[in-house]
Amino acid sequence: MKGGSFYFINYIMKKDYIEMRNKKAIDINFFYTYAVLKGFKGSVAEFNAGALHLMVDDALDHLDQEFGLTLLFDKKGNFIKVVE
């Protein structure tokens, strides 16, 4: 991907990620699409098999940093939402 299309896709992925995080639900389809955009060449079945071993918290931390997001927590340390 070159130029504007890369930035547009990254923008869409970031918005989808924020929406997913704020719903407090994991969407495996988001992670598959992200992996494919990052060069994953396997099938959905292969990805799903590997995803069983995925450390979800580590993946979320990575994407929070990659997309430059801020996490909001309540006084008890419970996640509220992410913001740009």
Image (spheres, rainbow, N blue to C red):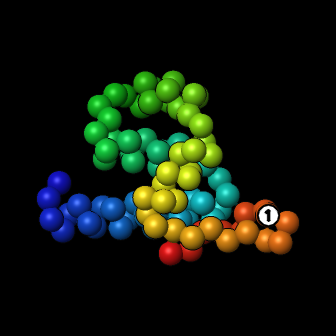
Q: Which residue appears farthest toward the left when viewing the image?
A: 2
In this view of the protein, can residue 75 be seen by the observer?
yes
* Side (left or right) of 19 relative to 10: right
* Side (left or right) of 75 relative to 14: right
Q: Residue drawn 30% across and 61% down?
A: 9
Q: Nearer the viewer, residue 72 or 41?
A: 72
* Side (left or right) of 1 relative to 32: left
The kind of secondary structure element at disc 1 is: loop
Q: Which residue is mark 1?
A: 77
Question: In the image, residue 46 lies at what x, y percent?
Answer: 43, 24
Mark 1 neighbour class, 10 Å CA radius: few under 14, some 14 to 19, many 20 or more: few
In this view of the protein, can residue 27 be seen by the observer?
no
Q: Nearer the viewer, residue 56 or 12?
A: 56
Q: How many marks?
A: 1
* Side (left or right) of 5 relative to 26: left
* Vertical placement of residue 52 versus 20, above or below: above
* Vertical placement of residue 57 versus 77, above or below: above
What's the residue type where badge 1 is placed? Gly
Q: Residue drawn 83% across and 72% down?
A: 75
